[in-house]
């Protein structure tokens, strides 16, 4: 309670005490005046009640005694005497002293005790009379929380509210909803008590409810829901299914006969088909209404489902393991994969049938083990999604926008390391949607949209990838501004007609979105290339789809795991390189004659299209002469076809990625390494960075 | 079915009736903090007057012991009237005495809170009866 409230209480109490004094003096002259007695009682009542609320417990306790006496006076159980007036005046002074907040001395306490004793002495029955004293200003009534670590159980509840519940301001539906908040709930409205229209009082409630509730809470918690109506309602709460397994069920007669071979299954079915269901028979016999049968069946169903669920939960129990242990496991599996590859190569070389069969077996088991180890590190992406709720809430409030975040596919599993690194790029994307995509409520309304904007997050598996989408229903990309900027940057010709897709691809280009002018003009693309780089670091890709007025969708495609790569193994000199396979499009040969034809411009013509290429030998400064016929591996790098020239293309491989040591972490153009079957190290190429580096060098040499 | 109060807390107007300014202040402060719109009345008579000019009131929180027109009489009057017949009425009472509570219930009170109570208890009860 704040001091301000205490201050107000104190002021009010002084006022009441002043009034009380004059009331008591009036009462002394006219001891039978009911109105004055009432006024005195109310004064005590208010001082006591408010006192307890604002932390003046001593006042509350003391005043309670006086109030009790005056309650008796009010009910004509006690007469007003000079002694009573005298005592009450003394009590009033005592309360005032307590209000003043002076330190209470021993004599004060004795004084108070004496007043109370004398007051009690006035009551018929003597000192014992106000037995209420004990229960008066009890603190912290209610608010008791039951431990809810109990096993879940199923309750059967019948709730028949008093007919006049509406006339008491009650709302049975609210109570049912409250029950739904406690646990899984099946509700059936029973309507058989509703009379014919002519007898029906529309202000009465005739419906009653049968419910099945599954919860860990005790039955007291359920009773609490009905606290205000319990006394007048017909309410029964029974446990019909405890957490423990039920008693073994008895076998049906039919099953026993079948087991003993006394009857055939067909025979049994035929006879059973002739038999009517119990429910139908009971309804026909007029013993029970159809609805009652329905609820009983529902109850059966509910319990059955709960039992099944519980059993499933018990059998699929989980354990917590430190993530380092998992990392170690994945590493070991990686080593095993490497050894297995060497073993396979050796078996092939020896060409021994028995050994080959062995190698195949080992390979199968190894891959299975690897897939299993990987799947252990998979986590549902939903944990990340839920962290965005706060972001959306805070940001939209800050900007004065009304935005709702929805999500689907939260259960989609993805490698833990990917999830961790995905957070920042997603924050960027969502910020963009809120900041620049979604319009102000008034603008939205003017455009015929709902005032509330929407950001939708979704995740789904697509092959070995995960697709994550951030969709908003905002204004979409500003085509004109992007076009103008692209022309200014020399990326497109002034009159060029671009498709939406091409236009969207522009904004993630480095040097495009980082320009400040674009940020403010296009109203979009804040740090888009930062996002793109983050995604690419995860070996993912990003696609933007925007429709003017309808909003923007950003699709992020990520590999399921960072630990494994499908790659193309290539060699230059004695070194080995791996290019992620998803980017590779084709391989062509490059003869010396071809190279000579391009006049040192490093451009190959592939089926009529010019494809620039980069010589890895030059890029990485590898010594030695290239072979007469080199290979160009053409890959899709950020939407452009680029060739990488190598000596030899070895073949596809699926391998476990090893991160580079601290010293090599910042080496340009290499994102990791892997160990080949024979123990050689191969470097995994970071294609986008190699291309960017080459472009930079080219620009520098031109200037 | 009563439909009052179905608009959610933002538009829910609550009338609080108590002759103690400090209680009114505390209840009002708490409910406003929880997003409700609050009207205050000092006793039953004042409450009925304010109610006639405020069709949007969807709930009443009232003390029982008050001058002029007490809480019980106020509840009877509201339930007997037309404009706010079905709204929830919660009584504030120090009387944990059964008789007083029963009297209030018989008059048509929806629920009760026993003083002293903590602000969050008040909000919980208001939320509960507003559904």
Image (cartoon, coloured by chain):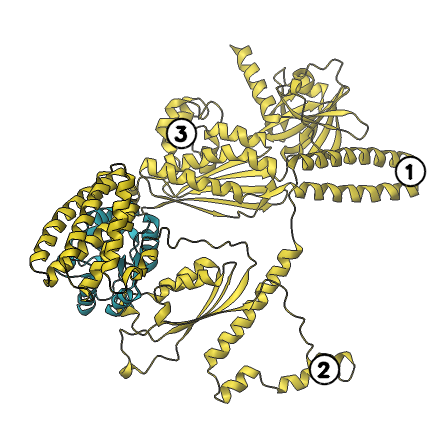
For the residue labelled by badge 2, is the local secondary structure a helix, a strand or a loop? Answer: helix
Which chain shows up in yellow? A
- Reply above or below: B102 against B114: below
Distance of mark 1 from mark 3, alpha carbons?
62 Å
Q: For the residue labelled by badge 3, is the local secondary structure a helix, a strand or a loop? A: helix
Q: Which residue is mark 2?
A: A266
Q: Quadrant of residue B69?
A: bottom left
Which numbered disc, 1 or 3, marks the residue closer to the eye? 1
A478 up-or-down from A290: above or below: above
Q: Earlier in the sequence, mark 1 or mark 3?
A: 1
> Which residue is drawn at the image coordinates 17% and 56% (left, top)?
A84
Chain letter for mark 2, please.
Answer: A
Please identify, in this view, whether the residue under mark 1 or under mark 2 is nearer the observer: 2
A505 vs A460, nearest the viewer: A460
Question: In the drawing, does residue B43 fall left or right of residue A112?
Answer: left
- Residue A99 image point, x, y percent: 22, 42
Q: Are marks 1 and 2 in contact (CB under 8 Å)?
A: no
Indicate left or right for A406 with A633 as reference: left
B122 left or right, relative to B22: right
Name the residue carrying label 3: A483
Task: Answer left or right for A124 relative to A582.
Answer: left
């Amino acid at each position: 309670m704040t001091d301000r409230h205490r201050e107000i209480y104190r002021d009010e109490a002084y006022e009441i005490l002043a009034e009380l004094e004059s009331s008591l003096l009036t009462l002394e002259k006219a001891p039978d005046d009911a109105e004055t007695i009432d006024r005195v009682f109310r004064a005590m009542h208010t001082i006591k009640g408010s006192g307890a609320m604002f932390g003046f417990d001593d006042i509350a306790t003391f005043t309670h005694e006086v109030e009790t006496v005056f309650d008796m006076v009010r009910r004509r159980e006690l007469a007003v005497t000079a002694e009573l007036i005298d005592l009450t005046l003394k009590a009033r002074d005592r309360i005032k002293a307590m209000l003043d907040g002076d330190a209470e001395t021993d004599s004060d306490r004795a004084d108070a005790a004496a007043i109370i004793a004398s007051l009690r002495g006035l009551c018929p029955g003597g000192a014992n009379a106000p037995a209420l004293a004990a229960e008066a200003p009890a603190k912290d009534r209610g608010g008791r929380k039951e431990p809810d670590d109990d096993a879940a159980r199923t309750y059967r509840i019948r709730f028949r509210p008093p007919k006049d519940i509406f006339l008491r301001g009650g709302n049975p539906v609210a109570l049912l909803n409250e029950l739904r908040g406690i646990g899984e709930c099946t509700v059936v409205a029973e309507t058989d008590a509703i009379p014919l229209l002519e007898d029906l009082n529309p202000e009465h409630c005739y419906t009653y409810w049968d419910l099945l509730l599954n919860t860990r809470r005790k039955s007291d918690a359920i009773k609490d829901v009905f606290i205000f109506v319990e006394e007048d309602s017909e309410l029964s709460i029974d446990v019909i299914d405890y957490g423990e397994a039920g008693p073994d069920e008895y076998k049906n007669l039919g099953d026993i006969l079948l087991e003993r071979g006394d009857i055939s299954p067909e025979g049994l079915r035929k006879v059973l088909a002739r038999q009517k269901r119990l429910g139908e028979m009971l309804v026909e016999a007029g013993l029970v209404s159809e609805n009652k049968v329905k609820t009983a069946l529902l109850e059966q169903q509910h319990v059955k489902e709960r039992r099944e669920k519980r059993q499933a939960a018990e059998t699929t129990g989980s354990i917590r393991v430190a993530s380092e242990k998992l990392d170690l496991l994945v590493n070991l599996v990686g080593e095993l994969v490497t050894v297995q590859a060497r073993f396979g190569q050796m078996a092939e070389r020896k060409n021994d049938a028995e050994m080959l069969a062995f190698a195949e077996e080992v390979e199968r088991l190894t891959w299975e083990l690897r897939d299993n180890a990987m799947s252990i590190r998979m986590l549902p992406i939903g944990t990340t999604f839920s962290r965005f709720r706060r972001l959306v809430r805070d940001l939209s409030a800050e900007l004065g926008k009304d935005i709702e975040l929805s999500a689907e596919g939260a259960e989609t599993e993805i490698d833990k390391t990917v999830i961790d690194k995905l957070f920042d790029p997603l924050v960027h994307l969502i910020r963009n949607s809120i900041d620049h995509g979604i319009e102000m409520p008034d603008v939205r309304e003017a455009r015929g949209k709902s005032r509330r904007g929407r950001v939708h997050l979704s995740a789904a598996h697509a092959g070995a990838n995960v697709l994550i989408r951030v969709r908003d229903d905002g204004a979409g990309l500003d085509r004109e501004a992007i076009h103008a900027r692209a022309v200014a940057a020399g990326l497109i010709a002034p009159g060029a007609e671009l498709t939406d897709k091409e236009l969207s691809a522009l904004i993630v280009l480095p040097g495009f979105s980082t320009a400040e002018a674009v940020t403010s003009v296009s109203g979009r693309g804040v740090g888009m290339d930062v996002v793109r780089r983050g995604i690419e670091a995860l070996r993912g890709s990003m696609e933007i789809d925007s429709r003017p007025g309808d909003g923007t969708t950003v699709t992020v495609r990520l590999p399921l795991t960072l630990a494994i790569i499908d790659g193309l193994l290539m060699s230059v000199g004695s070194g080995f390189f791996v290019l992620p396979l998803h980017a590779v499009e084709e391989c062509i040969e490059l003869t010396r004659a071809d190279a000579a034809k391009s006049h040192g411009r490093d451009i190959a013509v592939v089926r009529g299209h010019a494809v620039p290429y980069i010589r890895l030998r030059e890029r990485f400064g590898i010594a030695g002469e290239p072979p007469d016929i080199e290979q160009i591996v053409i890959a899709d790098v950020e939407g452009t076809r680029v060739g990488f020239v190598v000596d030899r293309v070895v073949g596809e491989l699926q391998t476990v990625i090893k991160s580079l040591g601290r010293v090599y972490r910042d080496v340009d153009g290499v994102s990791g390494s892997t160990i080949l079957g024979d123990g050689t190290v191969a470097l995994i190429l970071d294609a986008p960075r190699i291309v960017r580096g080459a472009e930079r060098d080219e620009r520098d040499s031109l200037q | 079915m009563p439909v009052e109060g179905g608009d959610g807390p933002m538009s829910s107007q609550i009338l609080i009736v108590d002759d103690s300014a400090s209680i009114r202040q505390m209840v009002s402060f708490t409910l406003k903090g929880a997003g409700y719109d609050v009207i205050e009345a000092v006793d039953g008579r004042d409450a009925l007057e304010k109610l006639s000019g405020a069709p949007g009131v969807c709930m009443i929180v009232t003390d029982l012991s008050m001058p002029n027109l007490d809480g019980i009489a106020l509840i009877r009057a509201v339930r007997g009237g037309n404009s706010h017949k079905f709204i929830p009425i919660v009584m504030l009472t120090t009387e944990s005495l059964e008789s007083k509570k029963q009297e209030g219930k018989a008059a048509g009170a929806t629920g009760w809170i026993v003083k002293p109570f903590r602000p969050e208890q008040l909000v919980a009860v208001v939320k509960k009866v507003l559904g």
